[in-house]
Amino acid sequence: MTRRLPVLIAVLFGLGIAGCGAGDGAGDAAGPAEGGQPVASTPTGPDGVDGLSEAPVPGEVPELLRFQAKTIDGETFDGADLHGAPAMLWFWAPWCPTCQAEAPTIAEVAKTEGVRFVGVAAQDEVPAMREFVDRFGLGTFPHLADRDASIWKRFGVDYQPAYAFVSADGAVEVEKELLEPDELRQRVDALR
C-alpha cells in the first residue's frame, strides 16, 4: 500500500493540474490534438455562443451574415453579400503587434482568386484603422470600422487575431487563434 500511495497521489495531482487549464471552454482557443495537429476552434453561432452555426438553408442568408456596417472609408457594407461565395473575415486591431506581424501574410493571401476578404477592425478610431491598412498594403479588400465591436460579438470574437471562414453555402467557422501562414493559406484554399 505504501508503494501505491505516491503513485496514486501523482496521478491525482496530474489530473488536478490538467483540470485547472480546462476553464469553461467559452472563448478558449483550441490547442494541438494528438500528433501535434491543431484542432479547429468550434464554429460560433449568431448569438455568440460557441457551437455550430445554423444549418445553411439553400438560397437563404444565414442569420450570422445578416448585418450592416460602415467601412473605414464610410461606405455601407452588407454582410448578406457574403452569402453564396466563399469568404474570410479577419478580425484585427491597429495597435495589435500580432496583427501587425501577420498583416503582410494577410495581404498576400487576400490575392487568392475566388475568395472574398473582409477586415473587421475594432478597439481603435477610424483614422488609426486607415493608417494601418495603408501602412501594410491591405487596401485591396474592404475593412469594417467595428468601433463598438458589435460584429466581433456577433461572431463570438473576444480578442484578435481571429478569423471567420464562410463557405459558399453560408456555413461559418470561427478560428480564435493565430494561424501560421501555411495553415492560413490552406484554410483559404479549402474554401474555393
Image (cartoon, grey):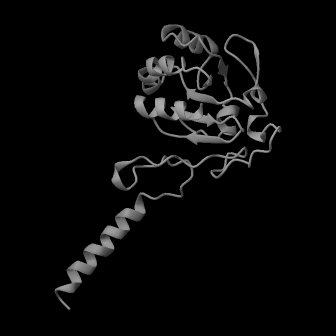
Side (left or right) of 108 relative to 70: left
In front: 63, or 167?
167
Q: Work out whether 185 lies above or below 73.
A: below
Please identify the residue farthest to the bottom as the structure is shown: 1
Residue appearing at x 58%, y 10% in the figure: 139
Of residues 126 and 112, the one nearer the viewer is 112
Q: Nearer the viewer, residue 51 or 37?
A: 37
Q: Is residue 52 visible?
A: yes
Would you place residue 184 above or below residue 11 in this image?
above
Q: Quadrant location of the C terminus?
A: top right
Kindly identify the residue that appears in the image at 42 percent across and 28 percent down: 181
Q: Position of residue 150 (x, y in %)?
A: 70, 33
Quarter holding residue 128: top right
**Is residue 106 placed above or below 192 in the rendered structure?**
above
Give the quadrant of the N terminus.
bottom left
The one nearer the camera, 168 or 45, is: 168
Residue at (54% x, 58% y) in the render: 24
Q: Position of residue 115 (x, y in %)?
A: 61, 25
Task: Please indicate, yes or no, whether residue 156 appears anywhere in the rendered image.
Answer: no
Residue under the point 63% across and 14% down: 126
Is 154 placed above or below 86 here?
Answer: below
Q: Position of residue 167 (x, y in %)?
A: 65, 36
In the displayed structure, does residue 135 sit left or right of residue 88?
left
Residue 111 in the image, given as x and y percentages of width and height: 54, 17
